[in-house]
Image: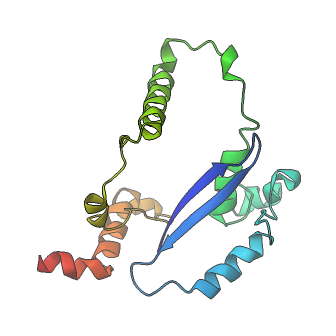
Amino acid sequence: MTLSQWHVPIDDQSCYWYAIFTSFGAPVDKAEMRRQRLELYTLPDYRSRKNRANHYGYDPAEQRTRTYTGMGSDINVHDQWAVESQGAIHDRTRENLGFSDRGIVAYRRLLLEAMTKSAAGERPLMVLDPAAAARLTGPATVDGIAPAAQWQDYWRDADGRRRRNAPWAEAGAAE
């Protein structure tokens, strides 16, 4: 199973978390997925029980003995921390970008061009038409911890297994 997620700002300090779970084998057990999510998120607002107010559940003893982050094993908490720990949106009008910030400048130009095209009803970069989207066969993601001695081969081997076991593998081989 893979997870695609978006952290979407809803104000200057908060985000909503959207996720799509894709199973390449058996159908997704929606009841189990909901049960797992509700261990961490409250209803009706889907706020995380681990958040800025409680330091995302950070435990220094856990960090010393069990996990790198000290925030439990749920990677969604780690992602939430990475997004939210940047703090409130900064006032960019007072920035003084330098030569080493060329990538930031280029990226912002791409975003502005994409927004302008979208507002004009044109198709921005990286937006697929329906025919191209139908040819996608799933994201190439691997979630796991590689054995130290074989870390170089881990991703290739795990992705190969995922692809061989996916329902679309047989359809692709038949074409």
Of 151 and 36, nearer the camera is: 36
Q: Is residue 14 left or right of residue 134?
A: right
Q: At 87% from the left edge and 55% from the top edge, which residue is drawn? A: 54
Q: At 57% from the left edge and 55% from the top edge, which residue is drawn? A: 6
For the question of whether residue 68 can be seen, the reply is no
Residue 89 image offset from top left, x and y in percent: 72, 34
User: In the orientation shown, which residue stands out farthest toward the front?
Assistant: 120
Residue 47 image offset from top left, x and y in percent: 78, 62
Q: At 29% from the left edge and 66% from the top edge, which residue is drawn? A: 134
Residue 156 image offset from top left, x and y in percent: 32, 62
Q: Is residue 108 left or right of residue 75?
A: left
Q: How many marks?
A: 0
User: In the orientation shown, which residue stands out farthest toward the left?
Assistant: 175
Of 74 and 25, nearer the camera is: 25
Quadrant in the picture for residue 51:
bottom right
Q: Is residue 91 above or below residue 94?
A: below
Q: At 55% from the left edge and 87% from the top edge, which residue is drawn? A: 29
For the question of whether residue 52 can be seen, the reply is yes
Tell me how the rendering is colored.
rainbow
Of 57 and 53, nearer the camera is: 53
Q: Is residue 31 above or below residue 42?
A: below
Q: Is residue 16 left or right of residue 61?
A: left
Q: Quadrant of the C terminus?
A: bottom left
Residue 146 image offset from top left, x and y in percent: 46, 63
Q: Is residue 146 above or below residue 104?
A: below
Quadrant in the picture for residue 126:
top left
Of 8 and 143, nearer the camera is: 8
Q: Is residue 156 above or below residue 161?
A: above
